[in-house]
Image (spheres, rainbow, N blue to C red):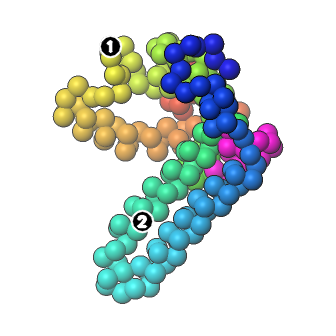
Amino acid sequence: NSERKDRVLPAEVVSRLSAKSDWKGLRQLGIHLVVTALGAVATWACLHGGVLGYLALPVVVTWQGFVLCSLGFAGQHECVHFTAFRSRWLNRTVGFWASVPSFTFAEHELLLHKDHHTFTGDPKRDTELLEMGDQVLKPGFRKIPDSPHAYWWSFVETVLGKPSNKMLKLINCARGIPVDYTGTGWN
């Protein structure tokens, strides 16, 4: 629906590629669930496979974690945009259940993501930039650290900070307190 004239693909191609289908969405969801189930079976096999199983376990658990995080984020993200399925109720239902593994709320993400698209790039109103603190004022690619030290520090902050932010979001949302990605307030 964009008025832009510099699109790479013709409007009819974009329209065909953007067509929504409950059947295609359910088929894709089924594939993701099968891959998730295969990861669970592989984890079980590792736990019951003796020494070799335990040696393979870190790889299998990492793979399964990636699958769950990918399904959780991508599934929820597409459902928040109402693009995974044609019907709104399927987007809302699958969006809710897809968000469970990542300890998020699809409705909460819908509100934050709408603000992100409304105020993209505005350091004071883009919800995805608010959690970055002073880094948001950096010109250029804001999310790329300036040095190897900054990269590793960012990694440590993410590993330690994301779980606490998610826990704060869960607690505050359960108490009826609206919060942004920081988990502590709504800016």
The spot of residue 45 in percent (x, y) is: 46, 81
In the displayed structure, 96 sits above or below 65; it is above
SS class, disc 2:
helix
Side of 165 where 3 appears, left or right: right
Q: Quadrant of the C terminus?
A: top right
How far apart marks 2 and 1 lie (CA) works out to: 38 Å
Q: Residue at x 32, y 83 (%)?
A: 52
Horizontal and vertical percent for residue 64?
47, 62
Q: Disc 1 marks which amino acid? A: Pro
Task: Residue 57: give x, y in percent of width and height.
Answer: 37, 72
Can you say whether 53 is above or below 148 in the image? below
Majority secondary structure in the magenta region: helix
Q: Which residues are magenta?
A: 83-98
Instruction: Give amino acid for label 2.
Output: Val
In the image, residue 163 lies in the stretch drawn in magenta: no
Which residue is identified by label 1? 139
Identify the residue under disc 2.
61
Image position of 54 with respect to 76: above or below: below
Residue at screen point 63% across, 13% down: 3
Horizontal side of 28 relative to 89 (left or right) equals left
Whole-percent x and y of residue 122?
A: 49, 12
Query: Is residue 65 in sight in this rendering?
Result: yes
Who's the residue at 23% across and 31% down the image? 150
Helix or strand or loop: what does disc 1 sit on?
Answer: loop
Q: In this image, 137 relative to 98: left or right?
A: left
Which residue occupies the foreground of this view, 133 or 50?
50
Q: Is residue 89 magenta?
A: yes
Q: How many marks?
A: 2
Within 10 angstroms of label 1, few (less than 14), some, or many (20 or more) residues?
few
Q: Quadrant of residue 179?
A: top right
* Residue 117: quarter of image: top right
- Earlier along the polypeptide chain: callout 2 or callout 1? 2
